[in-house]
Image (cartoon, rainbow, N blue to C red):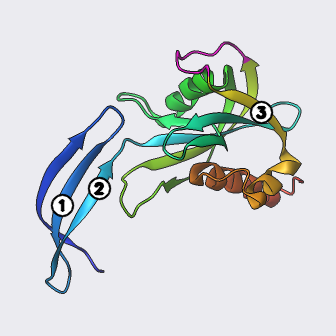
Amino acid sequence: MNEEKIISSRMAFEGRAFKVKVDTIEMPDGRQTTREIVLHSESVAIVPMDASGNVLLVSQYRSAVGMDLLEIPAGGIEPGEDPEQAVRREMQEETGYFPGKLEKLGGFYASPGYCTEYLHAYLVTELTAGRLFAEDTEGIQLMRTPIGKIRGLIDSGAIRDSKSIAGLLLFLERRALLGQLP
């Protein structure tokens, strides 16, 4: 195992959504270097499927990349919440739907080279229409997408963020293992 030993650590930034720390580390061969690490809470990534076999995707502007992205609903787990509570809250906030059934698809790190964020992926079904819950949802557009078109959207680059690709591929693999097509 190639563990790095932390020599010192300092908080470089504390924001609303994340913190950044800078660690001075000692490599296994004795050399010293630094690591800049984004500290982020765990999150949920949600694949919502309606009764007609459509996946509900959201299109929203992402300032970091300067464009609208087509994504699965997702968000951070708030203090005191478990992942399933976060799924229910995020579904209402981003889609206006409340999930009746939740199924864990798996989990993954967003970008472990520099970030601590771990995402819990869920499939949600038995959706009940409600209302959008959060105040910052005016820029979100809901897109009903037939399951058969998902792979093409990933392959063409129309879906390009890692959580959406990972969550949707976990979903498609689960369907394939169960013999459900497409």
Question: Residue 146 appears at what percent x and percent y?
Answer: 86, 42
- Secondary structure at badge 1 equals strand
Q: Amino acid at mark 3?
A: Met
Regarding residue 133, the answer to whether it shows in the image is yes
Question: Residue 132 appears at what percent x and percent y?
Answer: 63, 16
Q: Nearer the viewer, residue 156 or 63?
A: 63
Which circle marks residue 48 in the picture? none
Q: Nearer the viewer, residue 91 or 175?
A: 91
Quadrant of the rendered image containing residue 31: bottom left
Residue 130 magenta-highlighted = yes
Residue 61 magenta-highlighted = no
Q: Nearer the viewer, residue 27 or 99?
A: 27
Instruction: Establish if 178 lies above or below 40.
Output: below
Distance, label 1 to label 2, CA atoms, is 8 Å
* Residue that appears at 41% across and 49% down: 117
Which circle marks residue 143 in the picture? 3
**Residue identified by numbered label 1:** 23
* Residue that appears at 66% across and 12% down: 131
| Main SS category, magenta section | loop
- Secondary structure at badge 2 equals strand
Question: Residue 175 appears at what percent x and percent y?
Answer: 79, 53
* Residue that appears at 17% across and 47% down: 11
Q: Which image quadrant: the N terminus?
A: bottom left
Residue extent of the magenta highlight: 129-138
Q: Amino acid at mark 2?
A: Ile
- Secondary structure at badge 3 equals strand
- Mark 1 in CB contact with mark 2 (< 8 angstroms): yes
Mark 1 or mark 2: name the one nearer the start of the chain.
1
Q: Amino acid at mark 1?
A: Asp
